[in-house]
Amino acid sequence: MRLALVLMMLWLPPGGVHAQETPLKLLQTGDDSRGWNAVGRLDLGDSGFCTGTLITSQLVLTAAHCLYDKDSGALITATSIEFLAGWRKGRAEAYRGVRRAVVHPAYVYDAVDRLDRVANDLAVLELDQPIRLPSIAPFETDVRPAKGDEVSVVSYATDRSEAPSLQKLCHVLGRQPGVFVLSCNVDFGSSGAPIFSFRDGIARIVSVVSAKAEVDGREVALGVALEQPLADLMAALDQSDPAFLHVGSSIRTLSGTSGGAKFVKP
C-alpha cells in the first residue's frame, strides 16, 4: 500500500478525533492526574516544549528531534532543559534540570528519508537529581503492540500547554519498519509523548510520539517502535560522558516551514 504522508515534527515553537476513539480529557486536578504524574512538560530553553516521561527515577524518555533547534539544526544545551513532572495550572509535582541528554546513535535530524528519521527519533535525558516521590511512579516499557491494538496517550500540546490531556482509547492502524501509525490525537508539543498499552491493568510505554501525518486524507500520529532502539539508546547512555552523545552526519541548517515536507513511501 502506498502511504502519502505529510510529516510535521511536533515540538511547539516559542511564542479531529476519529469516531471510534475517545476524546481528549484534560487532566486539570490532582484526582484527574493521579497515576500520570511521571509524564511531564519538557521546557527546551528558548526552543519551546515537548512531552517527556520518567522511565526510572532519573531518566526521562522523549523524542530526539526535541533536542534540536528547528532553525539552526544545532543541539540544544542539555542544562537549558527543564523537566516539569505532572505540570498543570502553573505548578509541577517536581522540577528538575537536565545533566546530560543522549540521542539515539542512528538518529539524523536532517535525514532525507523521513520515515527512517522517525524510526530512530528517540532520546533519553538524565536529570540532575532523581525524582523519588510517592505521587510520581516511573513507567515501565512493554512489548510492541499489534495492528488493531488499543493504546492510550498522555500529552501536552499547543492548545493544552498548561495541563496534559489523556486520550484513553486510540488504535494502532499499521506499522512501517520501526514506525507505528496510530489514530491518536496529537499536535505540536506532543513530541516525545508516551503511547501506553494496558496489560493486566497496568499502563506501560510501547511507543513515543514522533510526528503527525496524513494517510489517505486522515490525520494520524507516527510513533517510534521502542524495543531495539531503546536498547541501543540505553547502551549509548552507559558509554557516554559528554553533555550530549550523537553519532551521525553533521547537522545542517534546515529550510522550509514548520509543516515539513510531503513525501511518498511505497
Image (cartoon, rainbow, N blue to C red):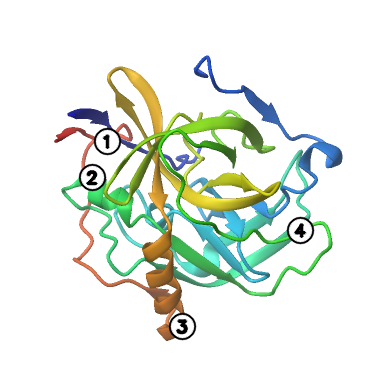
Q: Position of residue 126 (x, y in %)?
A: 56, 72
Residue 41 in view of the camera: no
| Quarter of the rendering occupied by the C terminus | top left
User: In the image, what residue type sits under mark 2?
Assistant: Arg
Q: Is residue 128 above or below residue 47?
A: below
State the mark number for residue 136.
4
Amino acid at dot 4 = Ile
Residue 218 or residue 42, whichever sits in front: 218
Q: CA distance from mark 4 to mark 1?
A: 35 Å
Question: What's the residue at 65%, 34% (across, down)?
Answer: 165
Using the rendered image of the protein, determine whether residue 265 is visible from the camera's viewpoint: yes
Secondary structure at numbered mark 1: loop
Towards the viewer: 141 or 263: 141
| Amino acid, disc 1 | Gly
Q: Which residue is mark 3?
A: 238
Tag 2 and tag 1, C-beta contact below 8 Å? yes
Dot 2 or dot 1: first in sequence order is: 2
In whole angstroms, how far apart are the C-alphas of marks 4 and 2? 34 Å
Q: Is residue 225 left or right of residue 44?
A: left
At numbered mark 2, what does the secondary structure look like: helix, strand or loop?
helix
**Residue at which label 1 appears:** 260
Count neighbours of disc 1 (C-alpha within 10 A) and say few if under 14, some if 14 to 19, many if 20 or more: some
Judge the density around disc 3: few (<14), some (14-19), many (≥20) Cα neighbours within 10 Å.
Answer: few
Q: Residue 73, located in which quarter of the rendered image? A: bottom left
Precedes in sequence: disc 3 or disc 1: 3
Q: Given the image, on which type of amino acid does mark 3 rest?
A: Asp
**Alpha carbons under labels 3 and 1: distance apart:** 33 Å
